[in-house]
Image (cartoon, helix red, strand yellow):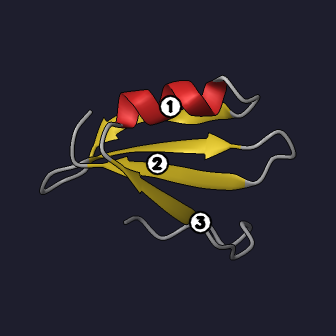
Amino acid sequence: MTKLEPSVAPRWLYYFMGSSLDAAAKRVTGRGDRIAHAASEVPGGGWIAHCLDPQGAAFALLSDQR
């Protein structure tokens, strides 16, 4: 991963693993959360999407399948 700019404060990013990234993304957006960074392939396999809850807290979805 690329090192963040010094102006960005350190923070935690929780990852939720599922069997299908697209199915999880549908559940997330159906509950008022939003996708901040669309699904992208992770080097070495797998898929990830970054999300924000209604209050702006960040989390990520992770899956072996899109």
Amino acid residing under circle 1: Ala
Amino acid residing under circle 3: Leu
How far from the left and from the top, in percent, is residue 50? 53, 45
Element type at mark 2 = strand
Against 65, is 34 above or below? above
Mark 3 to mark 2 CA distance (whole Å): 10 Å
Q: Residue 19 falls in which quadrant of the image?
A: top left
Quarter the N terminus occupies: bottom left
| Residue that appears at 37% across and 37% down | 21
Q: Earlier in the sequence, mark 3 or mark 2?
A: 3
Question: Do the residues bearing badges 1 and 3 touch, measured as CB atoms within 8 Å?
Answer: no
Question: Do the residues bearing badges 2 and 1 touch, measured as CB atoms within 8 Å?
Answer: yes
The circle on residue 61 is 2
Disc 3: which residue: 13
Element type at mark 3 = loop
Q: Residue 35 falls in which quadrant of the image?
A: top right
Compared across the picture, whether 42 is left or right of 54 comes to left
Mark 2 to mark 1 CA distance (whole Å): 8 Å
How far from the left and from the top, in percent, is residue 6? 67, 73
Disc 1: which residue: 25
Q: Circle 3: is it few (<14), some (14-19), or many (20+) Cα within 10 Å?
A: few
In this view, the residue in front, 14 or 41, is: 14
| Badge nearest the viewer, 3 or 2 | 2
| Residue that appears at 27% across and 33% down | 66
The circle on residue 54 is none
Against 17, is 49 above or below? above
How far from the left and from the top, in percent, is residue 56? 81, 47
| Badge nearest the viewer, 1 or 3 | 1
